[in-house]
Each structure stands twice: as structure tokens, then as C-alpha cells.
């Protein structure tokens, strides 16, 4: 798939952009300029009123954008955010969503990712897989995740709202993460251990597993060769960064583990657990950071029954 083809997929298939709609593209100086420029060009060809804004990169994922950018985010029909650090879990994105803006965040997107992997998926198929999985989880009370590497964690999700991100974002106030393909929830509580063996937000692909111990939904211990790096990233933001924020399951069969969380968390059959902010999808913690850890080859039990994962 070429860059031009993928931008057309994003604007037409995923976002359902129409002529004369207003489109804002927010990028930063650490993202390849061709991505923002091609999105701009494609939107202009469709007949949109399009604006491209470039800012300095944020220091970490979920850090708020400049005030001027945050205000502009609320004033358009469609918002596309290809940036090096994620604006997905920010109050600015939440405010734009509440204003009725259709939003696609693309944190860490690269030229290579725009031409291969998850972005090339058949998003109508991704939608079907994702929606089917969500139906199996909606009434769940307890999720247990187990792996051969030592993961054994129980998450209380009773009464929690499950969300699906399938890449089709045509309704006012809807949002997606592109590449898309996951079902996710903000748990009420969690106890146990999870072992990240795929990749970790802020660290990339792990050569050795990273073990995280959780008590009462808080990460209390980190072990593994890169444990100190993760602990530092979290603690420099504050104690709320240790909150177990999210449980997600990947549903994109075209996605591959590449060391970029944007794609890694969408890989079909993987599970991800995130620490930090969950205020933008039904949680109760505003932390200013959100870091996902990818768990490969998990066994997932829903109220004691083994769940068949997408493959």
C-alpha cells in the first residue's frame, strides 16, 4: 500500500470525510512531514476545508498539547493526530470528542507503518471481529490472564464499560486509534502479576520480560533488566502513573509486533495492560501518562471460562 492509498483509506473508509467538512491535522516536528502533508493533500482533494498544525513533540505520552492546539481541536468536524507522542489519553482530546469532533489519533506513526501492517487491514473485517469479541465481554465480572512466563492477574470489571476500537469512525463525537483493532476496558480493581514479554510503551520491544506486581490496582514492584527505566518514567510523573489503567485485547489480523505500541497493542491474540491515565475511556484517574505493555500468548478466562481470542 502506498502513502497516498493509506491516507485515502484513513479519510474515506475510516473517518467517512465528506466534501466541505473541516479537517484539522495536528503533527509534530518528530513525525515524518510527508504523513501530515499527504493527509492534507488528500483531504483537500476530497474538497475539505483543511488545516495543518505542527507543534513541538510532547515529553511523554498523554501530556497535554499547547492551549492553542487544544482550542483548535474542538472547532472542526474531523481531527487527525499523527504525532510522535500520544494525545489519545489527554483532556484536550476528550474535550474535542465531547464537542462532537470525529478523531483519529496516530501516535508514533511512521512512513513504514503507513505502507504496511495494521493500517492495510480490511477495516470492515476488523469491525466485525472487534464487535463480536466485545459482545462476549460486555457482561463479564472477572477477567483472569495467565501465561507460561508467570502472568497471573485477576481484574474486576463488573459494571465497567467495554469499548471497541475498530477504525470506523463516522459518528459525531467518536474516536479511533489508527491502526485500529482492540477491545478495552478500565478495570475497577486488579490483583496479581503480569509479565510483559512483547513490547512496553516508552521502551519498545523487550529482549527480556518485564514483571509487574499489582496490588489494589497499583503497580507496586517492577523486576527485569529494564525495570528501573519503567519505574523512572512513571515516578517522574507522579504516584497516579502507577494506576493499572486498562486491559485490552488486540483484534487486527494484519498488525505485527514491531516495537511501536500504536501497532503492537492491535496484534490479534495479544493482551495489553496499561499503567497511568484512563480518564478518557471511563476510568477515574487523570495521570498525564499512559504506557501499555504487550503480553503475547495469553490465556484469558472470563468468569472462569476460557475465551477464544482472535488469531
Image: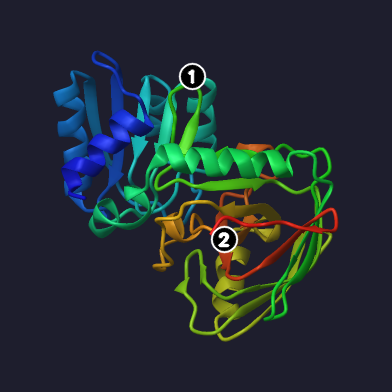
Pointer 2 or 1: first along the chain: 1
Say which mark, if any, is on residue 307: none
* Residue 159: image location, x then y, percent: 82, 38
Q: In this view, does 139 lie to the left or right of 85?
A: right
The image shows residue 258, relative to residue 206, as above or below, that is above
In this rendered view, identify the residue nearer to me: 256 or 233: 256
Among the 4 quarters of the image, the one containing residue 15: top left
Q: Name the residue under label 2.
A: 269
At numbered mark 2, what does the secondary structure look like: helix, strand or loop? loop
* Residue 122: image location, x then y, percent: 37, 43
Residue in the picture at 29% in, 18% down: 18
Residue in the picture at 85% in, 58% down: 304
In this rendered view, identify the residue nearer to me: 189 or 126: 126
* Residue 111: image location, x then y, percent: 23, 55
Q: Nearer the viewer, mark 2 or mark 1?
A: 2
Residue in the picture at 62% in, 49% down: 277
Q: Name the residue under label 1.
A: 100
* Residue 294: image location, x then y, percent: 56, 66
- What colouring style does the render use? rainbow
Q: In this view, does 13 lie to the left or right of 208?
A: left
Amino acid at each position: 500500500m502506498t502513502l497516498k492509498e493509506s491516507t485515502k483509506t484513513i479519510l474515506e473508509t475510516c473517518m467517512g470525510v465528506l466534501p466541505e467538512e473541516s479537517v484539522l491535522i495536528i503533527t509534530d516536528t518528530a513525525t515524518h512531514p510527508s504523513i501530515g502533508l499527504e493527509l492534507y493533500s488528500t483531504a483537500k482533494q476530497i474538497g475539505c476545508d483543511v488545516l495543518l498544525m505542527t507543534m513541538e513533540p510532547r515529553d511523554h505520552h498523554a501530556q497535554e498539547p499547547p492551549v492553542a492546539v487544544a482550542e483548535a481541536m474542538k472547532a472542526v468536524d474531523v481531527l487527525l493526530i499523527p504525532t510522535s507522542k500520544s494525545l489519545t489519553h489527554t483532556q484536550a482530546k476528550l474535550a474535542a470528542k465531547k464537542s462532537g469532533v470525529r478523531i483519529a489519533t496516530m501516535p508514533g506513526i511512521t512512513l513504514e507503518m503507513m505502507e504496511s501492517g495494521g493500517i492495510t487491514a480490511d477495516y470492515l473485517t476488523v469491525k466485525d471481529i472487534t464487535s463480536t469479541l466485545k459482545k462476549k465481554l460486555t457482561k463479564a465480572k472477572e477477567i483472569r490472564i495467565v501465561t507460561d512466563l508467570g502472568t497471573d492477574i485477576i481484574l474486576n470489571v463488573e459494571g465497567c464499560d467495554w469499548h471497541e476500537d475498530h477504525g470506523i469512525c463516522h459518528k459525531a463525537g467518536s474516536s479511533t486509534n489508527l491502526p485500529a483493532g482492540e477491545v478495552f476496558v478500565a478495570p475497577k480493581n486488579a490483583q496479581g502479576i503480569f509479565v510483559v514479554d512483547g513490547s512496553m510503551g516508552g521502551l519498545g520491544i523487550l529482549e527480556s520480560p518485564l514483571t509487574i506486581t499489582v496490588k489494589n490496582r497499583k503497580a507496586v514492584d517492577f523486576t527485569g533488566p529494564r525495570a528501573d527505566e519503567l519505574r523512572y518514567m512513571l515516578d517522574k510523573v507522579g504516584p497516579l502513573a502507577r494506576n493499572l489503567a486498562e486491559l485490552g485485547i488486540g483484534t487486527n489480523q494484519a498488525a505485527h509486533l514491531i516495537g511501536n505500541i500504536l501497532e503492537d497493542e492491535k496484534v490479534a491474540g495479544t493482551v495489553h495492560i496499561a499503567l497511568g491515565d484512563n480518564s478518557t475511556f471511563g476510568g477515574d484517574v487523570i495521570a498525564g501518562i499512559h504506557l501499555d505493555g504487550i503480553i503475547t500468548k495469553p490465556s484469558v478466562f472470563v468468569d472462569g471460562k476460557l475465551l477464544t481470542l482472535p488469531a
